[in-house]
Amino acid sequence: MGAYNKLKDVTSTDYFGPNEFMWWGESIGLSSNNIGDGVLAGNLRDFYITFVSEPVKVPLTAYVYAVEDSWNFPVETFNNISPQFPYWFSSKSGFLPPRFGGYVKFNSSSPVVSGELIGTGDGTTTSFNATLIHSPIKKSSITVHYTISSTDYTATDDGNGNISGTDCSGTIDYDTGAISLTFTTAPDSGTNITVDYDYKVRVRMIVWAR
C-alpha cells in the first residue's frame, strides 16, 4: 500500500492536568480545546495516530470513536499509554471512516509532584521564595508542608493564587510556578518546606495514513 503520509501534526493550545480530558477529532467541532479539524479522505484504508504529551511525557488514556452521522460506536480504547513513547493504533475495521474523533484523558496518578523541596528552615527565616520545577500548575492542587515548634502543618491554595495555613500565607503564580511564602513564626531549624502539586501539559497529535 505504500508508505504512510503525515496528514496532521497539531499540538493543543490549552494545557491539561490529572483527571482532565481533551477532545480531539476530525471535522467535529466538539469544543474550543479540540486539536483536530478538517476532513480526511475516505479512500484512505490504513491509518494510525500518535499521542504524546509535551514538554513532559506522562501516561495518558486515549478514547477513539468512529463517526458517521453521530457518535455511535468506539473504534479503539487504550489505557496507560507509555510516558516514554508515543502510542499508535490502527482502525479495527481496517478502513478509515469518513470522520473520527475522541478524547485523551490524563491518568489520575500523573502529572503529580509530591514533596518538592522549596526551602529549609533555620529557625529565624520567615520568607521563602521559589519557582516550582513544573508549570503551569493546576489550580487548587497546592499543598505546602512545614514544621513549626515540632508540629507539622499544611497550607493550601484557594484556586485564585492565594496560599493560607497555620502561621503561613503566600501566593502561587499558576502559569510560571513562582511561589512565595511568609510565616508569622519561623519554621524549625533543619526542617524542610515542601510542596505537593499537580501540573499540566499539552498534547500533540499526529495522524498518519496511506
Image (cartoon, helix red, strand yellow):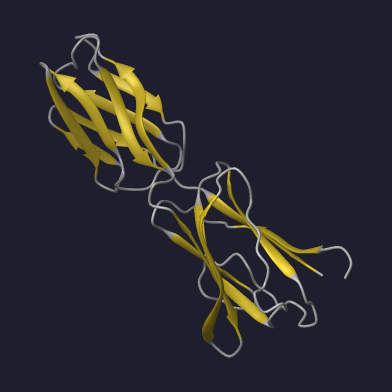
Q: Is residue 176 positioned above or below 103 on the image?
A: above
Q: Is residue 78 positioned above or below 168 on the image?
A: below
Question: Quadrant of the image for the N terminus?
Answer: bottom right
**Position in image of residue 29 (x %, y %):** 56, 76
Q: Which residue is painted at 76% across and 83% down in the image?
A: 42
Q: Which residue is painted at 78% across and 77% down in the image?
A: 45
**Position in image of residue 166 (x %, y %):** 12, 30
Q: Residue furthest bottom?
A: 69
Q: Which residue is painted at 46% across and 39% down in the image?
A: 135
> In this orientation, which residue lies closer to the viewer: 180 or 56?
56
Q: Is residue 124 positioned above or below 57 on the image?
A: above
Q: How many marks?
A: 0
**Position in image of residue 143 (x %, y %):** 26, 37
Asked which quadrant contains residue 9, the reply is bottom right
**Position in image of residue 84 (x %, y %):** 59, 42
Q: Which residue is painted at 23% across and 39% down in the image?
A: 156
Question: Quadrant of the image for the C terminus?
Answer: bottom right
Asked which quadrant contains residue 12, the reply is bottom right
100 relative to 158 in the view: left or right: right
Q: Residue furthest right?
A: 2
